[in-house]
Image: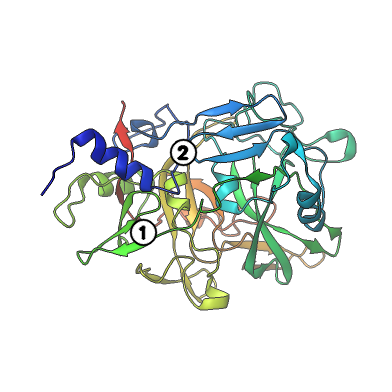
Amino acid sequence: MKVLPIYFLFTAIASAVTYPIIDTGQIQYYGTPKKGQDAQYTINPPTYKNNGDGTISDRGTGLMWTQDPGEKMTLAEGFKNAKKCKTGNYSDWRLPTIKELYSLIQLNGTDPDPRSTDTSGLKPFIDTDFFKFQYGREEIGERIIDSQYASSTKYVSTTMGKNETMFGVNFADGRIKGYPIKSRRGEGKYYVLYVRENPDYGINKFKDNGDGTITDKATGLIWMQTDSGKGMDWPTALEYAENLELAGYSDWRLPNAKELQSIIDYTRSPDTTGSAAIDPIFEATEIKNEGGEKDFAYYWSSSTHVGARSSDTAVYFAFGRSLGFMKDHRTGVYTLMDVHGAGSQRSDPKVGDASFFPHGRGPQGDVIRIDNMVRCVRGGNMEIVR
C-alpha cells in the first residue's frame, strides 16, 4: 500500500471540504474560565479580496459577494433584483442562504444599546474594510440596530403567532433572527448582499461513525451524536467540553458560534417536524418549555456576545422554539410565542438565575435561559492559539 506523505494527506482532506467554517474573529477572553473560550482557538481565518469591481471574494469559503447592500428592499424585491444584478459583469448572483450569509459574521463587534443614537465607539459585526455598512438611521425613524440583512432561508413555521418569516443576520447587533416577510405593518424591508460561486456551501454531509460521534465531511468537524442531556451555565459548559472523553478522544471543545450554526437544519422545527432543528442523525433531548409544551433546548457556544457596556452574555442557538413573552399593551397580558424561530442566534447571561426575568427581556420579551445544553465538537482546521 502506498502511504501519502503527511503534507499531501492534509491537502487531500482540505480539498474535500466544501463548507469551511470561517473563524469568528474573537481574540479576547471574557470572564472565566478562560480555557475553552472562543479566543483560545482559531479555525480558517477570513481571507477576503477586494476585486475592485464592486465584488469581494472570500477565498476561505469560495464565495463571491457584492460589496454594497444599497437601499433596503422587500424579500420579493431581493429575489427579483438578484436576477437583474450585473455587478462585476456577472449574471449568476443569488440571494444567500442563512448559512452563506452567516459566514460573514465577525463576533468582534459591539452590540449597541438599541435606545442609543450614538454610533461612536461601536464596531459592526461585519468587516467594514471590505463591505459597506450602515447603522439604522434616526432621521427616517429607524433604531440604531436596524441593519438587518435578508437571506433566502424561510422559516418552516411562523413567528409572532402567524407571520410568514425569513431568517436574516443583523450585522449591527450580531444576531440571527426570524424577520417578518409581511405583517400588518406591510412588507418588511432589509439590506441585501448577493452571492455567487460554491453552490455546495452550507450543505452538510453527515456520517455516523458508530461510536457516538458524527462526522460532517463538508466541514471536517466531528460532533457528539447526543447532547449533554441537561442544562448548565456557560462556565460549566466550557469545563464540561474541555473535560469530555468520548470515543477515545479527549480533545473535545465547546463549538464557537459559527461551528454550532453549521449543524442547524433550517428545514426542521418543533411545529413542522415535531423535532429540533437538526438532522435526525443526531439525538436531541426533549424539554418542557416555559409554557409546558414539548420543545427542544438552546445550546451554548464558546463565543461571548460583547455589548457596549458589558461582556456577561454568551452566544447560543435555539434548536427549539425561540420563545418570547409578547405583551399586549392594551391589556397588559403576556403571551408566550415563538418570536424568532428555531435556528435563531441570541445571547443570554453566562451565569445567574433565569427566574429574575419572569417575562424575558427586550422588545419581544425574549425568554432567558441560563442553563443551556451542550453539544461538543472536535477536529476541523482548528489550532490552539492562546
Q: Residue furthest right?
A: 140
Q: Which mark is residue 22?
A: 2
Determine whether 335 is above or below 122 in the image.
below
Residue with the mark numbered 1: 231
Q: Residue at x 50, y 48 (%)?
A: 348
Point out the image quarter for the C terminus.
Answer: top left
> Residue 129 appears in which quarter of the rendering?
top right
Total labels drawn: 2
In the image, residue 124 lies at what x, y percent? Answer: 63, 31
Give the amino acid at mark 1: Gly
Q: Nearer the viewer, residue 65 or 151?
A: 65
In the image, residue 120 lies at what x, y percent? Answer: 70, 21
- Mark 1 → mark 2, Cα distance in angstroms: 28 Å
Mark 1 or 2: in front is: 2
Q: Nearer the viewer, residue 38 or 31?
A: 38
| Disc on the earlier residue, 1 or 2 | 2
Give the amino acid at mark 2: Ile
Q: Residue at x 44, y 49 (%)?
A: 18
> Residue 106 appears in which quarter of the rendering?
top right
